[in-house]
Image (spheres, rainbow, N blue to C red):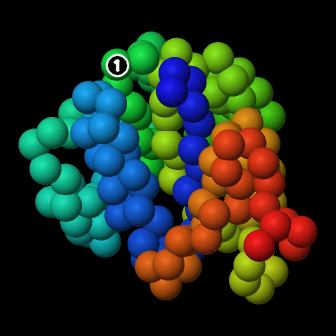
């Protein structure tokens, strides 16, 4: 299981975080792993404070929590080990933080991709699928949507398992590095 990467995609309030947390806990229980929650969100307003508190209140005492809004690659490189499983929630908040710092997005993506390819332990990553809606009216929102799509494609290409969650229902898109397509029932 060392180095297995799993991506969980979905819209806002789709159930993707709950699915990812349950996936991590089931693997942690089965393999006697320590579950580690890597939170990328930052409190910038009351709504975000409430959202973060909601996520924190849903986690039990088994979880270790690390907060890292920017240096995700460094944290994953340092923290991934064969005896623990990491949950990153979420990539799109990390991307927002990168954009807010006017970071070099291609370089940040390259670093994250390299870390995931060489991870010493299993990692589950949560990300929003934001490309299913209308085209945003401003440049920054369009850039975010496009960068999020590129980020999701990058991670999905590395991951051995990819799931899409909508309305609390989970659809496997790729399992054990095999994309599921029309030819597979």
As rendered, which of 118 and 131 lies closer to the eye? 118
Q: Is residue 77 visible?
A: no
Extreme-front residue of the structure? 185
- Residue 67 on image: x %, y %: 33, 36
Q: Give left or right: position of 104 versus 89.
A: right
Say which quarter of the image contains residue 130: bottom right
Question: Which residue lies at the image location 52% right of the left edge and 45% below the top edge?
Answer: 125
Question: Which residue lies at the image location 87% right of the left edge and 73% below the top edge?
Answer: 182
Q: Is residue 76 visible?
A: yes
Extreme-left residue of the structure? 61
Q: Is residue 119 above or below residue 19?
A: above
Question: Which residue lies at the image location 69% right of the left edge and 23% below the top edge?
Answer: 117
- Residue 128 on image: x %, y %: 58, 63
Q: Give left or right: position of 127 versus 135.
A: left
- Residue 34 on image: x %, y %: 26, 29
- State the residue position of label 1: 83
- Residue 11 on image: x %, y %: 56, 74
Q: Give left or right: position of 20 versus 51.
A: right
């Amino acid at each position: 299981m060392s180095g297995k990467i799993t991506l969980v995609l979905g819209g806002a309030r789709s159930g993707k975080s709950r699915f990812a947390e349950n996936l991590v806990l089931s693997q942690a229980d089965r393999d006697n792993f320590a579950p580690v929650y890597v939170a990328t969100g930052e409190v910038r307003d009351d709504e975000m404070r409430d959202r973060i508190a909601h996520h924190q209140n849903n986690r039990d005492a088994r979880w270790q929590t690390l907060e890292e809004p920017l240096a995700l690659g460094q944290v994953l490189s340092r923290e991934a080990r064969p005896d623990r499983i990491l949950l990153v929630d979420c990539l799109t908040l990390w991307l927002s933080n990168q954009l807010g710092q006017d970071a070099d997005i291609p370089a940040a993506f390259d670093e994250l991709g390299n870390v995931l390819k060489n991870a010493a332990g299993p990692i589950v990553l949560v990300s929003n699928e934001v490309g299913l809606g209308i085209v945003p009216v401003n440049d920054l929102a369009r850039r975010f949507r496009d960068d999020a799509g590129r980020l999701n494609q990058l991670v999905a290409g590395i991951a051995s398992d990819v799931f899409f969650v909508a309305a609390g229902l989970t659809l496997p898109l790729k399992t054990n590095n095999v994309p599921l397509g029309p030819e597979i029932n």
